[in-house]
Amino acid sequence: APVFASALLSVDTPVPAFLTSTAGINDPLRYAVYRNNVTVSLIRALAANFPSIERLVGEEFFAAMAHEFLTAHPPRSKLMFEYGAEFPAFLEGFGPAKPYPYLADVARLEIFWRQAFHELDAPLLDGAALAAASPDEFPHFTFIAHPAARILLSSYPAGSIFIANRKSGEADAINPAIPETVLITRPFYDCEVRILEPGTDEFFSSLLDGNSIKTAVEAAFTVTPQFDLPRAIGMLIASGAFTAIQES
């Protein structure tokens, strides 16, 4: 089986000697048809999992890049929506993609988006529980993260690029030098992608790490003195990133 699979994914690998027709002939041309079908199917599967990347680099470039990837990283699961876990790291080391250093983080967002989409449902944080808290207990609250919540700290505007390409928008006007922190949630049936403001990004990152509101607020103000706490609390409730207050 390993010999059969490796030969399928590499045109430079000879047809396995044990594969013969009923006449006992080892036929490379017939095998090439099967090899091509498998390769094309995997490239299409990767494109379906990373539509933003394909749109950014174009179909031809993506197909060539995907062929390089699948040769080194064949599928290890029957679930094709999971295929491409190694793709972001591959993009970071793929020479022809060096002029586009943001591609790896956009690919990570694609993975987070699919993971969030397929995650389990969970109840959402009840804002009334926060409103009813006393001033003494509120700073010490920690929260249970929603199973679908994902956050990415990127050195590039990966969120803006992701959103523009998902919605067929224009990514040309986006400044590639501006870092972004991106929150992906699925509060109901659709995934939501938010680009967090400075300060709010530290706040959410800290809370998702299991820290208290007090610790998260201190982290936010340390980095961003103009951090808008009321706005961040509103997003804490509305984003769907958390399910409940953590019992101490």
Image (cartoon, grey):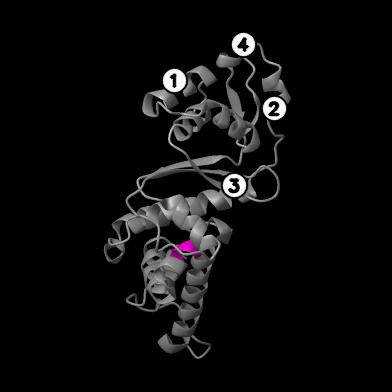
Q: Label 2 to label 4, Cα distance in Å?
A: 15 Å
Residue drawn where x is 69% and y is 34% of the image = 124
Task: Give the class, few, some or many, for how many residues have Cα within 10 Å of label 4's Cα (few <14, many ≥20).
Answer: few
Mark 2 or mark 4: whose residue is earlier in sequence: 2
Within 10 Å of disc 2 (Cα), the crowding (few <14, some 14-19, many 20+) is: some
Badge 3: few (under 14), some or many (20 or more) residues near its Cα, within 10 Å? Answer: many
Real-space CA distance between mark 1 and mark 4, rounded to the nearest whole angstrom: 16 Å
The residue where tag 1 is placed is 218
Of pointers 3 and 1, the one earlier in the residue sequence: 3
Q: Name the mark nearer the viewer: 2 or 3.
A: 2
Q: Earlier in the sequence, mark 1 or mark 2?
A: 2
Q: What is the CA distance from the residue labelled 3 to the residue labelled 1?
A: 29 Å
Front residue of 75/172: it is 172
Q: What's the residue type where badge 4 is placed?
A: Pro
The amino acid type of the residue labelled 3 equals Ala
Q: Which residue is pictured at 38% across the width and 23% down the height?
A: 222
The residue at 32%/60% (across/down) is: 100
Which of 29/144 is in front?
A: 144
SS under mark 1: helix
- The answer, for residue 244, to whether it is visible in the render is yes
**Residue of label 2:** 127
Question: Badges 1 and 2: C-beta atoms under 8 Å apart?
Answer: no
Magenta region, residue range: 50-54
Helix, strand or loop at mark 3:
helix
Residue that badge 4 annotates = 135
Along the viewing direction, whichever of 180 and 25 lies nearer the viewer: 180
Residue denoted by label 3: 116
Looking at the rendering, which quadrant does residue 11 occupy? bottom left
Residue at image position (61%, 11%) is: 135
Mark 1 or mark 4: name the one nearer the start of the chain: 4
Is the residue marked by circle 1 packed among few (<14), some (14-19), or many (20+) residues within 10 Å? some
In this rendering, the answer to whether 125 lies above or below 39 is above
